Image: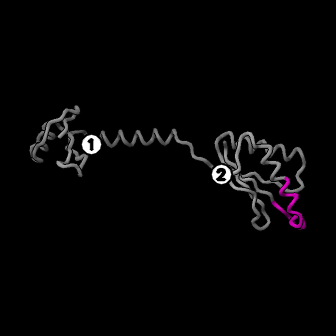
């Protein structure tokens, strides 16, 4: 048995402990049911539940969820477009998110996968200082995809 202030009250009968809790206007809560003998504590259970919920909300605020952001390229992409998309990918990585680099092939472009692989490899080298390759470039239908994770 543990008192409301944390003091050890020793081993008691359940009805005596319950009477002591009611006398103080608090609840008797079993905190360690598997212990021999089971451990109970006198506390305000509603306040305890509120404090736990408050701590959980605080922990949730501090956690950062990693999202998967996607940046789409084309095999014949021009220099300025390439740099703009790569800058966006760099920003996503700086925020702590993963980036899925997708290269889209249209029509006859699919006949030259080496052009697409060059673009994907160039993205990987441009972002090598802030990222590492989580999954290597692979073909999935008309798309070539690679996933980058922040360092």
Q: Name the residue under label 2.
A: 68
Q: Is residue 77 left or right of residue 137?
A: right
Q: Which one is in front in this view, the residue at disc 1 or the one at disc 2? A: 2
Q: Position of residue 135 (x, y in %)?
A: 69, 55
Badge 2 marks a residue whose secondary structure is strand
Reply yes or no: does residue 108 show up in magenta: yes
- Above or below 98: residue 110: below
Residue at the spot 63% in from the left edge and 49% down from the top edge: 67
Quadrant where the C terminus sits is top right
Q: Where is residue 106 in the image (x, y as percent from the top left)?
A: 86, 64
Verify CB contact (< 8 Å) between mark 1 and mark 2: no
Q: Where is residue 130 in the image (x, y as percent from the top left)?
A: 71, 40
Label 1 neighbour load within 10 Å: few <14, some 14-19, many 20+: some
Badge 1 marks a residue whose secondary structure is helix
Q: Where is residue 109 in the image (x, y as percent from the top left)?
A: 89, 64
Q: Which of 104 and 124 is in front in this view?
A: 124
Quadrant where the N terminus sits is top left
Q: Nearer the viewer, residue 26 or 144?
A: 144
Q: In this view, does 57 lie to the left or right of 125?
A: left
- The part of the image, by quadrant, that contains residue 146 is bottom right
Count of marks placed on residues:
2
State the predominant SS element of the stretch in magenta.
helix
Reply yes or no: does residue 90 show up in magenta: no
Q: Which of 100 and 35 is in front in this view?
A: 35
- Above or below 141: residue 137: above
Q: Name the residue under label 1.
A: 45
- The part of the image, by quadrant, that contains residue 117 is bottom right
Q: Is residue 11 left or right of residue 125?
A: left
Label 2 neighbour load within 10 Å: few <14, some 14-19, many 20+: some
- Colour mode of the rendering: one colour
Label 1, label 2: how many angstroms apart (C-alpha)?
Answer: 41 Å
What residue span does the magenta drawing correspond to?
Answer: 104-118
């Amino acid at each position: 048995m543990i008192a409301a202030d944390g003091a050890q009250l020793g081993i008691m009968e359940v009805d005596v402990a319950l009477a002591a809790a009611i006398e103080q206007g608090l609840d008797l809560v079993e905190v360690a049911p598997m212990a021999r003998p089971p451990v109970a504590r006198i506390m305000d259970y509603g306040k305890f539940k509120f404090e736990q919920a408050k701590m959980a909300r605080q922990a949730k605020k501090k956690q950062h969820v990693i999202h998967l952001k996607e940046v789409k390229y084309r095999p014949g992409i021009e220099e300025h477009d390439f740099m703009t998309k790569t800058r966006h990918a760099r920003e996503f990585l700086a925020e702590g998110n993963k980036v899925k680099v997708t290269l889209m092939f249209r029509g006859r472009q699919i006949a030259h996968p080496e052009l697409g692989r060059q673009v994907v490899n160039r993205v990987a080298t441009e972002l090598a200082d802030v990222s590492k390759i989580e999954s290597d470039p692979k073909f999935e239908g008309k798309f070539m995809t690679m996933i980058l994770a922040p360092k």
